[in-house]
Image (cartoon, rainbow, N blue to C red):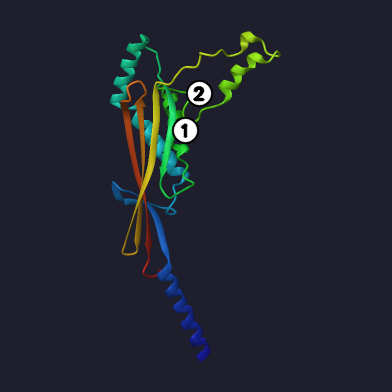
Amino acid sequence: MTRLLILTTLVLAGGILSGCNSTKTTTFNPSNPNESKLRVIGTVSYAECYEAARAAAQSAITSPRFDTYLAQYRREKSDEQAIPLMQVGYLKNQTRDPDLQMNLVTDELCTALMNSGRVDVTLATGRDVSQTFADARELKSDPNFNKETVAQKGTLEAPRLSLEGSIISNTVSENGTTEQVYTFNLRMADIKTGRVLWSYNKPFGTRKTRNAVGW
């Protein structure tokens, strides 16, 4: 009987201790802290990257400033169907998450912008620059290729727009709760003038709470 009582006491004590060490991690919207979802703190999920991209694309597509720029650009080109060419610039990871997939945001955003008919995207310059174009032009020295079909020098179009950005994070801990807020910042600028045509900020956060008891 005594042994049973001791074992029962140890089990209960272990449960209490484990309850004291249990934690719960959720996401939250800094503009609406009561809105939360379970997740792991300290990282950014694929779902959150795509969510930021979709929101950014909608912001760019409906931007009055970009509407004005596009109208001016088409007047400049004397072409009502002209679409500016955009390069994807270098995106800074200013967080402690080395595995942050910032490229997911820009790739999704670029796809949405192209599908909207707002911009075209180049692979000849920028973050995604491809060696393919230079290699293709060197085919002129290969006797196996018809010279008339080889891409010529001086035909690549320089981009008019640049998409750049960064993601930053800030962490605050108090009374057993740790909050970490990530902020996506994206900017589109006219390379000719350096003027920023569109800017977008998307904050979201993670909240980790250590419970006093486990039930």
Residue shown at 35% from the left, 27% from the top: 189
Mark-to-mark CA distance, 2 and 1: 16 Å
Is 87 situated above or below 180?
above
Residue furthest to the right in view is 144
Q: Which of marks 2 and 1 is nearer the N terminus?
A: 1
Q: In which quarter of the image is residue 214?
A: bottom left
CA neighbours of label 1 inside 10 A, class few (<14), some (14 to 19), many (20+): some
Q: In which quarter of the image is the C terminus?
A: bottom left
**What is the x, y in percent for residue 79?**
37, 10
Which amino acid lies under the numbered mark 1 shown in the image of this protein? Answer: Asp
The quadrant holding residue 200 is: top left
Count how many numbered circles sit on residues in the image: 2
Q: Which mark is residue 124?
A: 2
Q: Nearer the viewer, residue 214 or 44?
A: 44
| SS of the residue under disc 1 | helix
- In this view, which residue lies farthest toward the front? 141
Give the residue displayed 41% in from the left and 36% down from the top: 53
Query: What SS does tag 2 mark?
Result: loop
**Label 2 is placed on what type of residue?**
Ala
Q: Which mark is residue 194?
A: none
Q: Which mark is in front, 2 or 1?
A: 2
Q: Do the residues labelled 2 and 1 touch (CB within 8 Å)?
A: no
Horizontal and vertical percent position of residue 152: 56, 12
Name the residue carrying label 1: 107
In the rendered image of this protein, does residue 144 appear above or below residue 104? above
Residue 147 at x, y percent in the picture: 64, 9
Locate residue 143 relative to residue 21 in the image: left or right: right
Residue 171 visible in the picture: yes
- Taking depth in this image into account, of 166 and 7 the one nearest to the observer is 166
Residue 97 position, x and y percent, is 45, 49
